[in-house]
Image (spheres, coloured by chain):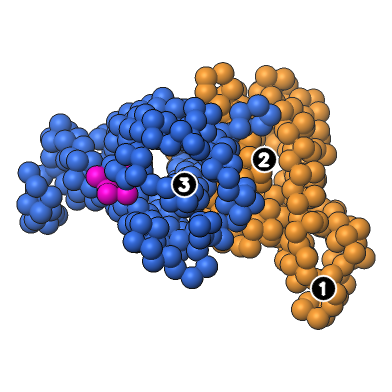
Chain colours: A blue, B orange
Amino acid sequence: MNPVSLEKKTAERRGSEPPMPVNEFEAAIRAVGPERYHDLHPFHHLLHGGKLNKGQVQAWALNRYCYQAAVPRKDAALISRVHDRELRREWTHRILDHDGQPPNEPGGIERWLILTDGLGLDREYVVSRRGALPATVFAVESYVTFVREQPLTVAVASSLTELFAPKIHKERISGMLENYPGFIDEKVMAYFKRRLTQAPRDADFALDYVLKNAKTREEQEACVDAVRFKCNVLWVQLDALYHAYVNGNVPPGAFRPET
Amino acid sequence: MNPVSLEKKTAERRGSEPPMPVNEFEAAIRAVGPERYHDLHPFHHLLHGGKLNKGQVQAWALNRYCYQAAVPRKDAALISRVHDRELRREWTHRILDHDGQPPNEPGGIERWLILTDGLGLDREYVVSRRGALPATVFAVESYVTFVREQPLTVAVASSLTELFAPKIHKERISGMLENYPGFIDEKVMAYFKRRLTQAPRDADFALDYVLKNAKTREEQEACVDAVRFKCNVLWVQLDALYHAYVNGNVPPGAFRPET
C-alpha cells in the first residue's frame, strides 16, 4: 500500500474502527520505514556513496551530534513520566548507552565525539552546538518535547525508528570506510558498530511494549503516526544539510567548512 | 538568626543586593535544616521514639512509598533538561540508586518494599498508591513538577535536604530497631542503611554545583527557597499522617489499619 492510500484509510478509520489485529498493527509500524526512513534521503546516498567532500561530512557529523546529545534528555523525559518501575529500569540503560557510566563506560556521545575529533572539528565547538543548523536544533528539540508531552505509549512508539537503524548503520560503516579513506577509519566508526547491537535490543523491547499497550484503534494510529513523526525529525536534518552544504545555502551563523 | 528575621531580610534584599559570599550562601542553605527539616516534626518523634502502633507505622511506610517512587521520576525530569553531559552522568546514578540496575542491583524502592512487606502490607496495594493520603500524592507530585519547571540550579538545590538526611536516618535505624521489636528488624531497615552512604555523596555534589552556579543574589535566594520548598514537601507528608493516623481523621479512600 502506498503512503497516500494508507494515510487516507487511516484518517477514514480513526476513532470508529475496532483495533487492528496485532500482526496488522506491527505491519503498519514496519511499513513506515520503507516509506519515510532517512535511508531514502538523497543526502544519505551521497554520504555512504562517497560523494561528499570532507567539509560536507564534517557538517553532517556536527549536526548529527545535536541529535545524539538530545537522546538521553529525550529518554530521561520519558522516564520522568513512568510510574512502572520495571519500564523505568529497562529504559534507563538507554541513558547509560548514550551518556556512559562512570568510571569506565564512555558512552555513545563520547564515541560520536571521537568521530568529530577524527574529522578535525574542535570538540568545544561541536558540543556548544553554535555551528549547528537551526533546523537541526528545532527538529531534535521537537523530539524531546514530543516524548515529554505525548501519551506514554505514543512516546515509546516514537523510538521505533530503531527497527530500521541496523540497515542504515551497516551501510554507513561499509560505505564510509570504503569511500573516505582520507578521514574515516575503523576507530571513528565505533559509534555505529556499538549501535548494531544496542538498537535491535531496544527496538524489540519498545515494539513489544507498544503492541501490548496501544489498545484502541486511535492509540494504534497515534503510534504509527509517532514513527512517522520521528522519521520527519530525521528527514528534516538531512534536508537542511542538503540545502546548506550540497546546494550551498549555508544560513547565517552556521558552520562553514574551510575551503 | 531566627526564620522570621532571615526571611524578612531576604525579602528586603531580593533583586538589589550583591550576591552573598559563598560561605554565607552555604550557611543560609544549611540553616534551613534546623528551621524546617522534618526531623523536627512531632510524627517523626513519635515514630523513632516507639510511640506508634503497627498500623500507624504501616500508614507511614505506605505513604512514604509514594515519595520513594517519585524520586527517580524527579531525577529523570532533571536529567531531561540538562545539556551538560558530565552533570547528566553524575545525576543518572540517582535513578540507579532508587530503581536499581538489572540484573543484580534491586535499588532503593525495592528495599522500601521489603520494609512494607515486613510490615505485612500487600505489595500490589502499596505500589498502586490507592491507599495513600491525597496530601502525600499532591506533595510528591509537586516536587516532580518543581524539578521539571524551575531553573536548573534551583531544581538541583531542591535536592539539598539530603544534607540533613543522615541524622534522621541514623535516628530512624536505632529508634525503630529498638522500639518495634515485634515488626522491625535489621533486614527491613536496609533502605536507611544504604542511604547513609548514598545521601552524603549526592548532597556534596549538589551543594558544590549550587554554590558554583547560583551567581546572582536572586538565584541564591531562589536556591535557599528551594530547600525550604523541599522541606515543605516532606513536612506536609508528616502533617497528613498525624492528622489521619494520630488524631484519627482518615480521609475517604485512604488506608485504614486493621483494628
At x 86% / y 56%, what residue is drawn?
A: B26
Q: Amino acid at mark 1?
A: Thr
Question: How far apart are labels 3 and 1 at the CA level?
Answer: 57 Å
Using residue A15 as the reference point, say whether residue A189 is left or right of it.
right
Percent across and percent down for residue A153 are 33, 44
Quarter containing the N terminus of chain B:
bottom right
Which region of the structure is painted magenta?
A: A40-44
For the residue pair B27 and B35, the one nearer the viewer reads as: B27
* Badge 2: residue crowd in 10 Å (few <14, some 14–19, many ≥20): some
Q: Is residue A242 found inside the magenta-colored segment of the image?
A: no
* Badge 3: residue crowd in 10 Å (few <14, some 14–19, many ≥20): some
Q: Which residue is mark 1?
A: B10
Question: How far apart are labels 3 and 2 at the CA level?
Answer: 35 Å
Give the structural element (helix, strand or loop) at label 3: helix
Reply above or below: A242 against A167: below
Chain for numbered disc 1: B
At x 87% / y 72%, what residue is drawn?
A: B5
Percent across and percent down for residue B12 are 82, 80
Question: How far apart are labels 1 and 2 at the CA level?
Answer: 32 Å
Using residue A176 as the reference point, say whether residue B175 is left or right of it.
right
> Which residue is at the far front?
A259
Numbered disc in front, either 3 or 1: 3
Q: Quadrant of residue A240?
A: bottom left
At x 18% / y 45%, what residue is drawn?
A: A35
Numbered disc in front, either 3 or 2: 3
Q: Main secondary structure of the magenta part?
A: helix
Reply above or below: A99 against B133: above
- Quick one: label 1 or label 2, which is nearer the N terminus? 1
Q: Which residue is mark 2?
A: B90
Chain for numbered disc 3: A
Percent across and percent down for residue B250 are 54, 49
Q: Which residue is mark 3?
A: A54
